[in-house]
Structures are given as C-alpha cells and as structure tokens.
Amino acid sequence: MGEMQFDARERQDPAQREQDLFAKLPEFLGHAVSKAPGWAEYLQGCDLAGVTDRSALARLPVLRKSELMEKQKARPPFGGFLAGDLSGASRVFMSPGPIWEPQAPGLDPWNGARSLFAAGFRAGDVVLNAFSYHLTPGGFILDQGAIALGCTVFPAGVGNTDMQIEVIETLEPVGFVGTPDYLKVLLDRAKDQGRDVSSITKALVSGGALFPSLRQEYEGQGIKVAQCYATADLGVIAYETGADTGMVVNEDYIVEIVRPGTGEAVSDGEVGELVVTCFNPTYPLIRFGTGDLSKIVPGQSPCGRTNMRLAGWMGRADQRTKIKGMFVDPKQVAEIVSAHPEVSKARLAVRRDGESDVMTLSVETASAENGLGDRVASTLRDITRLKGAVELVAPGGLPNDGKVISDERDYG
C-alpha cells in the first residue's frame, strides 16, 4: 500500500481540526453573503461573525435540497446561490430535479483524491471510470480526483459493456470506479466471453448500496472494494478506509446530523438527516440538508484517521407523504413536538385500514398526565388538518431509524 496517509491533516488532533474549520467559517460566510444574493437573503439577520462553533452554526437555518430546487426554478439557473458569476467555473452541470451545479475551481474540486488514496489507488495507476459523464458531475467527481492523485483515467462512462471489456484487456487498468453493481456486470460478461480482466485489483464505488455479499464476491476474485459517499452538490463527503468501520468524513467539510424537518442536532449514534457545510468558494453550501439519513459512529477509526465517522447512507430523510390526499411534512411533526414541552420525539405512522388511510402519532414522553394524549391529538389535527390517533411511549421507546413519518402502507 505504500505510505498510509494522503496528508498529515487526516491524523490531526480532532479538537485542532474543529478549531481550524470554525476559525475560517465566519470569513467564508461573509464571502457567501457578499457574493451570492441568494445567501444574503437566506441568512439575513443572522450573526455570521459569531459562528465560531457548532452551537452557533446550529442557529443558522438549514437549506434543504428541495428548497434549493424551488429557488433555482424561481431564479434560474442557480437561485442566486452562485458566488459571483460563471467565469470562475470550467463546467456547469444539470442533475435530475433539475438542479444546477457549477464546477468549483482547482484540480480536485470535489475532493475525491483522498477517498481514492484510502481505497489503495496510487500515482501511476490506470483507472477505468464507469460513472456517467453525461449532464451530471457523476463521472467527473472521481475522474478529477484520480488525475489529482497522478493516475491515468480511461473515461468509460456507462454502458458499452463489451467495449469496456476490450479496454480492460488491452489497457490492463488496476483500478475501477463506478457503481457497486456494474463491476459485477463487467466480470460476469468477461467470464462468459473467456476474456481476461484480472488486471483490476481495486475499486472505489459509490451511487448505490454495496451489499456485504457482493463485497465478498469481489474479494473472492481478488478485488478490494471500498465505497465513498458523494453527492453532485458537495463532492466526496465521507469515504471508507476498511470494511465495517464506517466512513471517515473528508477534510474541509463540517458535517451535522439533525432531526428530519428541523435544524436541531441529534445525539451521536442517533439516525437523522445529514447536513453539510462545505468551503466551496464558487458555490457555497451552508448547512445544506442532503435529504439522506445517516448517523455518527462513535469513536475513532482503527486506521488512525481522526475525523468523525458516518455509518454511510441509511435511507431518505425527505419523508413528505401524501395521506388522505393531503401532504404531511416532517416539519409539521417537528411543530407538534415543539408545541408540547413534555414531548421529546415523535413518529407518525400511516397504514391502510380497509380502503382508507389511518395515521398514528407515537410520542416519547416521561409524563402521561393531564390529558397529554388528547392535547397532542388536537395539535395534530390543527397542524395537518387530519385526524389521527396518539400513542404515548416511554423515552427511548421509538425506533432509531431517523423516520419522522413512516409510510407503512402496502403498495404491492
């Protein structure tokens, strides 16, 4: 594997890292509001100079992806969230939604090199990149990271499996990057055709779940596979350094886990929505709600990297659900909780009873006195305009899965 760190920052004291990130945050926030009118409006009235720690950051509003999409639609293409103009961006992309993203400056704008290094990629490696280069940043994220690391990239993109097998046989790349499943498609097809693709010994995958059985199958064929968690807007947020030890958060990102529908941090180990602040000068994203669920894995990685760890992707936090023809949003559940100080947490379950939707709001509370159930039921009706049953649960009694709205209707 050679040297075991991409740079010294990976091993710095966690308190020092936190101090460094928050030391540069107020100036960065100032840059965002002075250059991007969307941020100036969104953060109006916030004390940005005072955002020097997590509790101050938590007072800023969360900007969720769905909201950014609406703002971009109202003020195309970037909703006013681009800092300056497009002259600083070498590419611009459109992801499904549609949502627009400019490419940040620099050789590795999505911070992919570190994740490739952790997966065993080194300068001089030839890498087959099977992520899509079409419309979205997908293919470019790790393409640029690999080039920054000193690798040579074959931009294969998606599909043309037979041609890709010919490429592998001829170029003999040692590395593969792409979705977890497509590597198997290539290996199976090569086997059917009696072609040699054994040059590939390492892979970095993203964009889907890498199931343990599939990882084992790859290892059985001599391919060590790691995954990274990346999004089009933010780049590589976290990456694996060894199976089953969680994903280490990338440098230069501030990651929070909040209760869906709110901006409040949950405790370590509790599942919630991943909210990320990144220091992208072209396209600043501040407390950006990804809509993905994850949790913090307590303790440090055995690999020696000191940044916090995430459990990877655990589902969607955007649980807006249609019940009896009306949309109910996690924000509304949060409103119900804040209307009753005795309630610490709530979860709304929707089921079918015959041909109609029924909903039950379970709330965690230590005090079941003075008609709390009835009072919560009436708040539920006021806020959602729908009737539902209320169930009182002891503190800690609700599942730790990040679900604020659980749709349990059978669509089969």
Image (cartoon, rainbow, N blue to C red):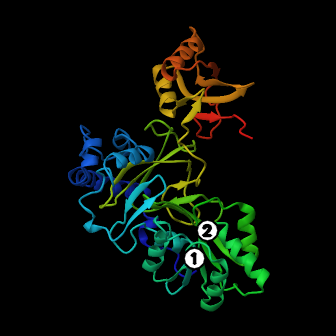
Of residues 300 and 246, the one nearer the viewer is 246
Q: Residue 165 vs residue 328: left or right?
A: right
Q: Is residue 397 visible?
A: no
> Which x, y percent locates residue 155?
52, 79
* Residue shown at 30% from the left, 47% from the top: 52
Residue located farthest toward the left when viewing the structure as drawn: 34
* Residue shown at 56% from the left, 13% from the top: 372
* Residue shown at 70% from the left, 60% from the top: 211
Q: Is residue 138 above or below residue 273?
A: below
* Residue shown at 58% from the left, 66% from the top: 241
Residue located farthest toward the bottom when viewing the structure as drawn: 170
Give whichever of discs 2 and 1 has the lower sequence position. 1
Of residues 324 and 271, the one nearer the viewer is 324
Under tag 2, what secondary structure?
strand
Q: Is residue 21 visible?
A: yes
Q: Circle 2 sits on which residue?
A: 226
Q: Is residue 89 above or below residue 256?
A: below
Under tag 1, what secondary structure?
loop
Under mark 1, the amino acid is: Gly
Q: Is residue 45 above or below residue 74?
A: above
Q: In which quadrant will I find the N terminus?
A: bottom right
> Which x, y percent locates residue 344?
53, 27
Under mark 2, the amino acid is: Ala
User: For mark 2, does the 10 Å Cα neighbourhood hold few (<14), some (14 to 19), or many (20 or more) residues?
Assistant: many
Quote the CA–CA distance across marks 2 and 1.
Answer: 9 Å
Of residues 118 and 175, the one nearer the viewer is 175
Q: Circle 1 sits on which residue?
A: 120
Name the image quarter holding residue 86: bottom left
